[in-house]
Amino acid sequence: MQLKLIRTRLILLVTAILVCGFLTTNILSFQVSKNALRTTILNNELPLTSDNIYSEIQTDLLRPILVSSLMANDTFLREWVIDGERDTGKIVRYLDNIRNRYDAFTTFFISNKTLAYYHFSGPSRIIDENNPEDDWFFRVRDMKDEYEINVDDNEQQGGAITIFINYKTFDSNGKFIGVSGVGLGLSSVAAMVKKYEQDFSRNIFFVDKTGFVRVSSQESIANNNINNMNGIQNLATEALSKDRGSFSYSRDGEEYLLTTRYIPELKWYLFVELPESEATAGIRRGFIENIIIGFVVIGITIAMIIYVINFAQRQLESMAVTDKLTGLGNRQAFDVSFGDAIKRARRTNEDVSLMMIDFDNFKSVNDSFGHIAGDEVIKRVIGFIKPMLRESDILCRWGGEEFSVVMPACNAKNAATIAEDIRDGVMDEIFVGQDINWRMTISIGISELSGTSDDAVDMLRRADSALYLAKENGRNRIEVAQII
């Protein structure tokens, strides 16, 4: 019982060491890989995505810039202005045609001479130099560059936020005559953002300098201010104060990685974010697979350890109760078997007898031929005796050349009959050993369980006394102890 408990504790300890060591190693490896990947995404992948998106924005804005350039250099537009802007229907039709041909959100022209604002839907109003909302026109007029990209409200179309391409227009002599251009509506920009998200597998949104989210495909973010948004509000001031930045934050129970970049053409900030769970999905999946494989390996290892321990224990137990020379049970095995037989006899009210066998004059064999030859004789004699016993009888080596037989369900008389056959058979047999031919005789003492107070010690004492009497009476004989 104690050995079994030690074995169980050992197996549990080994299992705990393997599991703890394996989990600790894998968890640390996962954390290191996760942190390394996180750093790589923040410092390399997301900034690279921002750069690629910025390049695509410039590419996507190139077409409306070219359209504005075509308008600014269109002969019709120049001649119409030089001709005195007399037929406004022509310019309106021209602007509407440009809008439809190039799928623009809006098209316009502002005359420097008359300050009239012409729109594809018709003449709208006169630009006022004292009106702050019209400052952009005079800024464009005085700037050195040929065009600018400006984000502003489009009063002519319900105040919709529009990305305007404002292009300076000159006559054939290089004289400034006005500003022409096209505008992209937020729906067009939103379509661009959706395309970017599909191409780069990232969450993308544009934020103005006040923190207001101008464009986003995420309903939870669109039309919100990052200064009031959970998680990101803590880094809003820093993100809006520099041209580039890398951040991480939590929102709605999810960790996000974020890079920001200022887009000077739009005067907006480009925010590119990636849920950390998506970024680490690959290594997390690998971590889980490693855990599963590891536990399978640990299970197999523990099963092998249990098998080896059980095998070793069985071997040790067998060695502990088995006589090495004869393969019979030893004194320890005899004690267990004899005790069990007596208990069973008490329980079932059956007889049980004990036979003690000793080789006669065995010392002369060892003295004459050596111990190896003596051992060979012992094995051959026992090999002869075993088949003559009943299947239920238990033959054990008591020590040296002395053997004991526990005989369940057998009284002394029947035991004596079996003993006589054994004695007679051994006497008539010649046992061949190494370089010897030897005729062996045996003496046998028998005792029977009797009375309720009788026990193993009493039976052993009586059987041993009977054996001693057989030796005293000339050997090669059987003596049965008196039943008390």
Image (tube, rainbow, N blue to C red):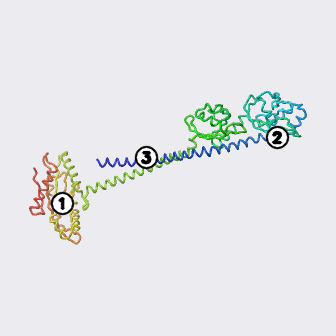
- Three-letter amino acid code of the residue under disc 3: Cys
- Three-letter amino acid code of the residue under disc 2: Leu
Judged from the image, the secondary structure of the residue bearing numbered disc 3 is helix
Distance (Cα) linking label 1 and label 2 = 122 Å
Circle on res. 402: 1
Q: Is residue 47 left or right of residue 440?
A: right
- Three-letter amino acid code of the residue under disc 1: Glu
Q: Is residue 450 left or right of residue 203?
A: left
Distance (Cα) linking label 2 and label 3 = 72 Å
Q: Position of residue 304 (x, y in %)?
A: 39, 53
Q: Residue at x 89, y 40 (%)?
A: 173
Pick the residue in front: 92 or 420. Answer: 92
Q: Residue at x 86, y 35 (%)?
A: 177
Q: Which residue, as the protein is rendered here, is positioned at the far right?
A: 83
Q: Is residue 147 left or right of residue 275?
A: right
Q: Image quadrant of residue 324?
A: bottom left
> Dot 1: few (<14), some (14–19), or many (≥20) neighbours within 10 Å?
some
Judged from the image, the secondary structure of the residue bearing numbered disc 1 is strand
Circle on res. 70: 2
Circle on res. 278: none
Of pointers 2 and 3, the one earlier in the residue sequence? 3
Q: Image quadrant of residue 265?
A: top right
Q: Is residue 426 left or right of residue 215?
A: left
Circle on res. 20: 3
Distance (Cα) linking label 3 and label 1 = 54 Å
Judged from the image, the secondary structure of the residue bearing numbered disc 2 is helix
196 is higher (above) or lower (below) than 314: above
Pick the residue in front: 121 or 114. Answer: 114
> Dot 2: few (<14), some (14–19), or many (≥20) neighbours within 10 Å?
some
